[in-house]
Image (cartoon, rainbow, N blue to C red):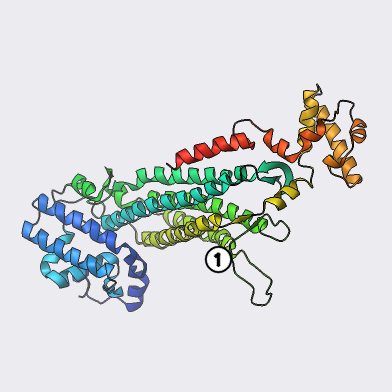
Amino acid sequence: MSKLWGGRFTKETNKLVEEFTASISFDQKLALQDIEGSLAHVQMLGECEIIPVEDVEKIKQGLLDIKQMVLAGELEFSVEHEDIHMNIEKQLIDLIGPVGGKLHTGRSRNDQVATDMHLYLKGKTEELIGLVEAVQSALLAQAKENVETLIPGYTHLQRAQPVSFAHHLLAYFWMFERDKERLQDSLKRVNWSPLGAGALAGTTFPINRERTAELLGFEKVYPNSMDAVSDRDFIVEFLSIASLLMTHISRLSEELVIWSSQEFQFIELDDSFCTGSSIMPQKKNPDVPELLRAKTGRVYGNLIGLLTVLKGLPLAYNKDMQEDKEGMFDTVETLEGSLKLLAPMMDTMTVKKENMKQAVQQDFSNATDIADYLVTKGIAFREAHEVIGKIVLYAIQEKKYLLDLTMAEYKQFSSLFEEDIFEVLAPEHVMGARKSFGGTSPEQVKVQIGMAEETLT
C-alpha cells in the first residue's frame, strides 16, 4: 500500500474519498511549524535515548533540507499523502531512507497537528498585536493634529454635542487597545504544548514532554492527553477576539464612509485608498472601508462555523476537527490585510476642519449647555430642560439657531438669561467646558493623548 498507514488495508483509497478527506490543499500553510515541531520532537527522542544519536542527526538534517525546500517554494505537495504531516514525513523518508520513519516514534498526527496550530497561532497573534499598534499610532497621530478641531458628536445619528475630533478618534484608539490586550492575554492559552500526548492516551515511550515544550518556547504542557489532542478552545478564543476586533474596524470604517460622503464632507480619503466608477467619472468611492466593513461577516462566520463543528464532538480527536484550519487561516489573513490597509489609510486622511466647524454652528448641539447655564442660576435641571425644549422649538419655528436668538428672545423664556449666554453657547466653549476626566475638552484630550502614548511605549 502507498499510504504510510496502509498496512491494515486491503484496498486503495477511493479517489473521491482521498480528495474529500485530504487537507494538504490548506494545511500546507503549517509546513514550517510542522518541521519546527518535528525538530524538537526528534531532539527529545535522542536525549531520552529512544532513538540513536546518529539517527537523530540524519533526521534533523533531512528536516532542515526540507525546510529550505519549503522556503524556496520547491516542495511539491501531494493529495495522495493527505496532509502536511504525511507529506513531510514521506519527503523525509525519500531523502534519508527508512531511518526517516523513526521520526514518528512516540507521537501521533493528533498531537502533531495540535502542536502545529499552537505554534502557528502563537506567531500570528504576536504579529497581529504589532499591526493593531500600527493602527493605534495612526489614530494617535491624527488626534494630535486635531485636539481643538470641532466636529458634531452624534447619538442616534442625530447631532448631540460638539466634540473634539481628536476625542472621537481616541475612542477607537481605546477600543483597539482592549483588542490588543485580549490578544496578549490569549497567548496564555496558546502557549500550551500538546506534543507527546499521542493519539489520545499518551505513549509507552519514556519521552520528556517538558523538554519539547521548552525547545518550542511553550510555557506549559497539557496535563491531560485527551484534552491536549481535542482542545480547540484557543482557536475559538482567537476567532472571538478577531470578531470583536473586526467589529471595531467595521464601526470606524462606517464613519469613514459617512464622513467622506458629499452630504458630510468632513474628511477626504487619499486617492490611493479609493476607486472610481466605470460609468460615472466624477465618483470617488471609499471601497477600502466598505470592504473592511463587509469582511467582518466572514470573520463572524468562521467563529460560528468552528463552534458548530465542536459542539457535538465526543473526546478525543475526530476527523471533524480538520475543519478547524481553513477558518483560522482565513481569519488571520483577513485581519492582516485589514489592519495593514487601515493604518496608512488613517495616516493619509485629510481632515476638513472648516466643514466640521461650520456643521457645529448650524445645529442645536449646544442646547444642553443652556440647561447647565440655568442650573448654575439656581433652577433644577429638569425645569431647565423644559425651558430649553421650548427655546429650541421656538428657534426651529423661527428658522434660527440658538446663537442667532436675541437677548430679548431669551428673556421671553427666563429672566435669568444674561449676555454671557452667547459666550456659553459658542461651540468652542461648549467643547472646552467638558473638563471632567475622559471629557472632550482640549485639556482632557491632551491628558488622553499622554495616556495613549504611554501604552505604545
Q: Residues within 10 Å of mark 1 (few under 14, many from 20)?
A: few
Residue identified by numbered label 1: 272
- Splitting the image into 4 quarters, where does residue 269 fall? bottom right
Specify the amino acid type for callout 1: Ser
- The residue at 30%/57% (across/down) is 116
Q: Quadrant of the N terminus?
A: bottom left
Vertical position of residue 396 compared to residue 341: above or below: above
Q: Quadrant of the C terminus?
A: top left
Is 445 positioned to the left or the right of 195 in the image? right
Label 1 SS: helix
Q: Nearer the viewer, residue 302 or 138?
A: 138
Is 153 positioned to the left or the right of 55 in the image? right
Whole-percent x and y of residue 360? 74, 46
Q: Nearer the viewer, residue 400 or 181?
A: 400
Residue sitting farthest toward the top? 378
Whole-percent x and y of residue 375? 78, 25
The total of numbered circles placed on residues is 1
Whole-percent x and y of residue 169? 59, 46
Whole-percent x and y of residue 196? 22, 51
- The residue at 35%/50% (across/down) is 231
- Splitting the image into 4 quarters, where does residue 396 fall? top right
Q: Is residue 198 visible?
A: yes
